[in-house]
Amino acid sequence: MTSLEIIIVAAGSGLRYGAPLPKQYCDLGGRPVLMHTIDALRAAAPDAKLTLVISREMTQLWQDLCDRHNFTSPDIVFGGATRWESVCNALKSSVGIADIIMVHDAVRPLVSKEIIDRLVKAISSDTGVDGAIPAIAVTDSLRSISDDGHSKSIDRSTMRAVQTPQAFRGDRLHSAYDLPYTDSFTDDASVMEAAGYCNLVLTKGSSSNIKITNPGDIAIAETLMKLNSLS
């Protein structure tokens, strides 16, 4: 049986969100966003090992929230100053290396079993695949901006918006994270590519798998949750 570990990255400060608390701890339908994310992953991949990365400063808050909501937290690892450092800390904490390791944003609470299954299938069906990333088509028109401020149109049919979880062969992800950090590491796929693991396939994502970035996204997520409960 293929072993699976999912790292949930929840150590961010969420400064762009503009709330008193990081957005992963903000209320969504009566509970913190992060709890919805964890429950969604537990439902989608019940046999997976979950590792939660949080800021050390938020330990007591998270414990208080878990007590208040009678919620069982996954194993906790403390994050770092960057996403790269947070994931690196989680990998170093692992006992053994799972066949597949996924890295998921804590503020994507509507991840589905279908997304997880497609990622696992993409990696398991071809040993040459280094990783798999859920993606959706771009619907807005796009323009690129040059250094002089001018812009030009981009063919959006060649563009995809990527989501999480991003999934990788466990041994190769561990090897990639042996590289020293650079500013070009914007996500885990970029770390893999820097290490030479470039066979990263795209799988079907979902427009419902939103990332809560702005305050209005909470209302959107609540609406999507209600629609999912009716389907």
Image: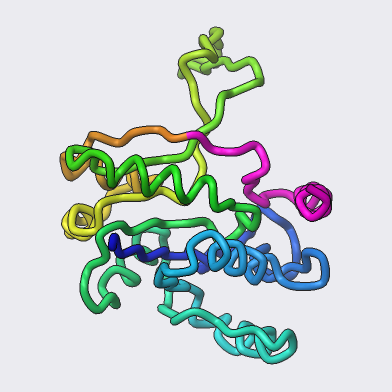
Left/right of residue 70 with respect to residue 52 in the rendered view? right
In the rendering, at what x and y percent does residue 195 appear?
A: 17, 45
Spot the residue most to the front: 1
In the rendering, at what x and y percent does residue 76 appear?
A: 45, 81
Q: Quadrant of the N terminus?
A: bottom left
Q: Nearer the viewer, residue 107 or 29?
A: 29
Q: Nearer the viewer, residue 69 or 229?
A: 229
Q: Considering only vertical position in the picture, is 29 above or below 162?
A: below
In the rendering, at what x and y percent does residue 41 appear?
A: 54, 63
Question: Where, by quadrant of the figure, is residue 6 drawn?
Answer: bottom left
Question: Is 212 covered by the magenta stretch?
Answer: yes
Residue placed at 73% from the left, 68% from the top? 26
What range of the chain is rendered magenta? 204-231
Residue placed at 44% from the left, 71% from the top? 50
Residue placed at 59% from the left, 23% from the top? 138
The reply to whether residue 22 is visible in this rendering is: no
The reply to whether residue 86 is visible in this rendering is: yes
Q: How many marks?
A: 0
Residue placed at 73% from the left, 58% from the top? 18
